[in-house]
Image: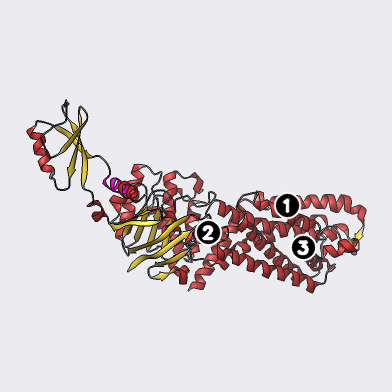
Amino acid sequence: MRWRCYFIAFRTIVGKEITRFLRIWLQTILPPAITIALYFVIFGNLIGSRIGEMGGFTYMQYIAPGIIMMAVITNSYSNVVTSFFGAKFQRHIEEILVAPVPHVVILCGYVTGGVARGLIVGLVATIVALCFTDIQVYSYSVTLVVVVLTATLFAIGGLINALFASKFDDISIVPTFILTPLTYLGGVFYSIDLLPDFWRTLSLGNPILYMVNAFRYGILGVSDITLGTAFGVIIFFIVGLFCIGLYLLQRGIGLRT
Amino acid sequence: MHALEIRDLTKTYRSGIRALDGINLTVDEGEFFALLGPNGAGKSTTLGIISSLVNKTSGAVKIFGIDIDRDFAKAKFHIGLVPQELNFSQFESVYEIVLNQAGYYGIPRRAARENTDRYLNQLGLWDKREQPSRALSGGMKRRLMIARALVHEPKLLILDEPTAGVDVALRRSMWDFLRELNAAGTTIILTTHYLEEAEKLCRNIAIINQGKIIENTSMKALLAKLHAEIFVLDLVKPLAKAPMGSAFEFHLTDQTTLEVMVYNDQIVNDLYQFLSAHSIQVSSMRGKANRLEELFVNLVQNDA
């Protein structure tokens, strides 16, 4: 009986989250599509045509998986961080806190909402990419698993950020100063084989590199990192962040006085 | 059975402020209970702990016999909370807010819709159901929070200043609604700064001050502690000075307004006889102050 109640609560949180970002699609779905189109026009078409091949593919084809993944990462993260912090700020998170909803259900509900937005924006990004270049998917299963796991990881990250945030500035610090640099330096626009030894070794400490490369493997069949290593890193971070997020919720950090 | 049982409850905030200093309180099932106290006395902290929005420092809380430390989830099914501050999404519709709340309590969709329809109708919000909550008036927002708190049909309804900022007519209609709800079996705990509200609605009362319960009794027993009451008489003809030679104490505030102190052991009929005997005609008569308000101020001042 309780499990059924918990499932209904989970479904309610997910439904509310999806309704929220679809209601404001002009802020959540459309801007990434425009940004991605600009990336393809400028980096893929104008500059890319002078770069030549990379990993046996045109530059446009090579950067397409990275750009799609970048959209997934940014949107899954920002969906949860803005929604959860907004709920804290307006205090309607209390609607869930006073109800018999276990912390794990709250976490999974918000994360699923973030994953849903990440996947929808990822799909939109793929459609935009198809307008510029031909994409032949090498492995659908790897592609799908990597994109879902990556969206999950960053959705959990967004929730942790929102828990600690006490003002709106706090929810833009991590995306601006950590997420964006790591994404741009995570092999979205280049292969790390092009880097000098020192920078290549340093890049291996960037978790986003593993996600971008695993996703690139799924689509193009080429990667700077072995698939097993990439999955290992992604799952390690998911488990770690999930435990941290759950612990923070249970302690009521940022939620209860 | 006790709807609520609090034992030695303490709360010390990280800032070092001790908001609750070992309070004990029981509220029986079916009661309409008032928890009163000045600002910062610990009322909202107590309600916050009961509803899981505030972590307690020590002590025990049981809701219908369920210890919140053992099975808070089960205890929460019995509680409906109407908080002091507005705490719903400004962007969601009235219907979504109430329906989603039912979902958080695990109520299946069909039953959730039925409950939502019923409470939105009962609280006069049905016509506004499609509107975003931010478009509602202040009184409607209060009623929305009551509908949301009731949608899972709790046995214990907690109202933290539910009529703050609500006009007189709406306040009275909310009182009627709450009386009916209580008569139907819902236990209600109310905090309010309108002491008239507590006096009219509640059968039992606790007064909290500086984190301690300083009074916990029935409303009748509390009001019986008043030794005297002041009545204000509006006179038909002006008087030059206050009447003398009576057991009653008179005070003329202006030429046509007379105040009289009536002690518990005095009979009001004697007052009427005295006034008639001195040809003083009275056009209207009223109590000078809310009786509970006087007691409340006395108790809190004595405790300080």
How far apart in space, not on screen, are marks 2 and 1 (Cα)? 28 Å
- The colour scheme used to paint the residues is secondary structure
The amino acid pointed to by label 2 is Arg
Q: Which residue is mark 3?
A: A208
**Both marks 3 and 1 on one chain:** yes
Question: Which part of the image, by quadrant, shows the N terminus of chain B?
Answer: bottom left
Q: Is residue B295 magenta?
A: yes
- Does label 3 or label 1 sit earlier along the sequence? 1
Q: Secondary structure at mark 2?
A: loop
Other residues around mark 3 within 10 Å, as few (<14) / some (14–19) / many (≥20)? many
For the residue pair B128 and B49, the one nearer the viewer reads as B49
Q: CA distance from mark 3 to mark 2?
A: 33 Å
Asked if labels 1 and 3 touch by Cβ distance under 8 angstroms, the answer is no
Q: Are marks 3 and 2 on the same chain?
A: yes
Tell me if I can see residue B125 in this picture.
no
Residue B65 falls left or right of residue A120: left
Q: Nearer the viewer, residue A142 or B11?
A: B11
Q: Which residues are magenta?
A: B290-296
Give the mark nearest the N terminus, 2 or 1.
1
Quick one: SS at disc 3?
helix
Q: Disc 3 and disc 1: Cα gap in Å? A: 15 Å
Quarter location, residue A123: bottom right
Residue B162: image location, x then y, percent = 39, 50
Q: Name the residue rendered at 83%, 62% in the picture.
A: A203
> Which disc, if any, is residue A176?
1
